[in-house]
Image (cartoon, helix red, strand yellow):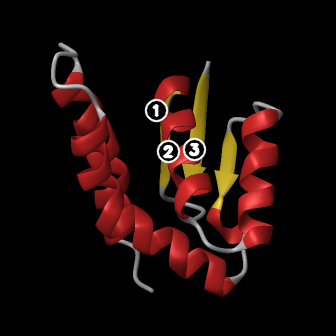
């Protein structure tokens, strides 16, 4: 099973479900907009496997993009266990999402 985060219509991060759910949980924990959190919780609870940033308001989208661009990789580096043999690969997968978000022009 996989999940996709659509940064734009053309820029889509499609990954294994573990990475998708890790990112969604990270956003749930760090987005400070109740409506955005509720929508992401619904995506997570219903195992929908799709998040389109265009479905969020401009303010919500800016916050999500900021988290993806600036904060998610350091969080992954801190939270993913060093003894996990696939740690660097997992961080690399998260970094691909951050890079994709950074390439988006606000």
Q: Which mark is residue 23?
A: 2
C-beta proximity under 8 Å, tags 2 and 3: yes
Of the image marks 1 and 3, the number of the one nearer the N terminus: 1
Q: Residue at x 29, y 30 (%)?
A: 90
Mark 2 neighbour class, 10 Å CA radius: few under 14, some 14 to 19, many 20 or more:
some
C-beta proximity under 8 Å, tags 1 and 3: no
Q: Which residue is mark 1?
A: 19
Judge left or right: residue 86 versus residue 6: left
Mark 3 neighbour class, 10 Å CA radius: few under 14, some 14 to 19, many 20 or more:
some
Which element type, helix, strand or loop, lies under badge 1? Answer: helix
- Residue 30 at x, y percent in the picture: 52, 62
The quadrant of the picture occupied by the C terminus is: bottom left
Q: Nearer the viewer, mark 2 or mark 3?
A: 3
User: Residue 34 falls in which quadrant of the image?
Assistant: bottom right
Q: Which residue is mark 3?
A: 25
Looking at the image, residue 68 lies above or below residue 73: below
State the CA–CA distance, disc 1 to disc 3. 10 Å
Q: Residue at x 30, y 47 (%)?
A: 96
C-beta proximity under 8 Å, tags 1 and 2: yes
């Amino acid at each position: 099973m996989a999940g996709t985060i659509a940064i734009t219509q053309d820029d889509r991060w499609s990954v294994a479900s573990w990475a998708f759910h890790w990112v969604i949980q990270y956003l749930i924990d760090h987005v400070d907009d109740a409506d955005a959190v509720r929508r992401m919780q619904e995506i997570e609870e219903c195992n929908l496997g799709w998040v389109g940033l265009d479905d969020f308001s401009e303010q919500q989208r800016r916050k999500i993009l900021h988290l993806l661009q600036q904060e998610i990789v350091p969080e992954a580096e801190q939270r993913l266990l060093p003894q996990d043999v696939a740690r660097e690969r997992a961080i690399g997968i998260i970094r691909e999402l951050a890079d994709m978000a950074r390439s988006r022009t606000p």
